[in-house]
Image: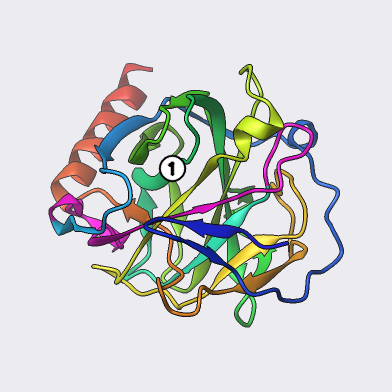
């Protein structure tokens, strides 16, 4: 079953074929620790708004231009983790990612604490294919538990300079799931969490399609995850909010000097 869309109204997503469920679960995989998230921006509920001033300098992809006013819940929570919803991303270039942002909406009337978990894949003819690796390292990031306020709609930013990773100058997929590890949240609580829809991208491009897994799970280092693509009939366009930032040249020079100083001190 595919998710429903929440915003100024409720739209049922047309059913499509669903593949064999994956057996991934939160406790089965170990990935990079992303630390704490910070709030970049909170939106008023149920309203579309132009927020192009939120685009970060140095971004290789950002669709933080126009918020549709709608939220797509991940749904399917089972065993303390939701299904994963992924979007296709075509950046303007590749680069070393020091910071990125994504969106979370809480559609419930109570606070929900959860761990957001981010996953990446190479594209395979329009669906997530081989799991994304930077060199020999599979890239997946789990953040510390954070409380999403009742009815909140926000952009959340991660400083990943301590675990910086490269993204390709090519189409890839990025997905988000939520689990309840280290929180009192139930599966019913997790059902209220989802992602905000934005379009068009300010930098880069993204097709009017998303991917949802057949079952709940972590999906870390899982190639060709079981699931299906879908869209929302073009209203709104099926693009969730993401932004990826590389250091500007001056910042890279400072990082290099800092690393050199560290090596010399050792």
Tally of numbered tags: 1
Residue at 20% of width from left, 54% of height from top? 55
User: The C terminus is located in which quarter?
Assistant: top left
Q: In which quarter of the image is residue 230?
A: bottom right
User: Residue at coordinates 64% horizontally, 52% vertically from top-left?
Assistant: 84
Relative height, residue 141 to residue 93 (above, below): above
Q: Is residue 128 left or right of residue 99?
A: right
Counting from the top left corner in percent of width and height, residue 87 is at: 51, 64
Q: Residue furthest bottom?
A: 125
Left or right: 231 in relation to 31 = left
Tell me: residue 254, above or below residue 114: below
Q: Which quadrant of the view contains residue 128?
A: bottom right
Of residue 42 and residue 38, the one placed in the foreground of this image is 42
- Which is nearer the eye, 139 or 80? 80
In the image shown, does 27 or 239 lie closer to the viewer? 239
Q: Most extreme residue toward the front, as rendered? A: 9
Q: What stretch is highlighted in magenta?
A: 53-82
Residue 222 showing in the rendered view:
yes
* Quadrant of the image containing the N terminus: bottom right
Q: Is 245 situated above or below 89?
A: above
Residue underneath mark 1: 105
Estimate the x, y position of residue 264 in percent, counting from the top left.
Answer: 31, 23
* Above-or-below relation of 252 to 94: above
Residue 66 shown in magenta: yes
Circle 1 sits in a helix, a strand or a loop, which is it? strand
Taking 74 as reference, is 144 left or right?
left
| Position of residue 121 measured from the top left corner of the image (x, y, whole percent) | 60, 62
Let me know if residue 144 appears in the view: no
Residue sitting at x 84%, y 58%: 21
Instruction: Tell me where residue 160 appears, x and y as whole percent.
Output: 40, 37
- Residue 19 part of the magenta segment: no
């Amino acid at each position: 079953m595919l998710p429903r869309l929440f915003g100024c109204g409720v739209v049922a997503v047309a059913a499509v074929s669903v593949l064999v469920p994956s057996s991934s679960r939160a406790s089965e995989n170990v990935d990079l620790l992303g630390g704490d998230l910070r709030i970049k921006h909170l939106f008023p509920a149920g309203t579309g708004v132009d927020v192009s001033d939120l685009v970060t300098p140095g971004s290789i992809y950002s669709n933080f231009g126009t918020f549709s006013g709608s939220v797509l819940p991940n749904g399917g929570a089972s065993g303390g983790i939701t299904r994963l919803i992924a979007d296709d991303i075509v950046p303007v270039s590749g680069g070393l990612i020091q910071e990125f942002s994504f969106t979370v909406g809480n559609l419930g009337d109570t606070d929900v604490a959860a761990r957001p978990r981010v996953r990446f894949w190479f594209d395979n003819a329009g669906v997530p294919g081989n799991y994304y690796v930077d060199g020999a390292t599979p890239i997946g990031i789990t953040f510390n538990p954070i409380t999403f306020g009742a009815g909140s709609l926000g952009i959340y930013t991660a400083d990943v300079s301590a675990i910086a990773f490269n993204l390709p100058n090519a189409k890839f997929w990025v997905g988000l799931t939520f689990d309840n590890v280290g929180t009192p949240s139930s599966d019913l609580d997790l059902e209220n969490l989802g992602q905000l829809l934005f379009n068009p991208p300010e930098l880069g491009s993204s097709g009017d399609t998303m991917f949802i897994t057949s079952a709940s799970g972590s999906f870390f280092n899982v190639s060709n995850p079981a699931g299906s693509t879908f869209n929302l009939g073009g209203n709104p366009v099926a693009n969730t909010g993401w932004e990826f930032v590389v250091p500007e040249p001056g910042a890279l020079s400072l990082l290099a000097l800092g690393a050199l100083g560290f090596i010399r001190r050792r």
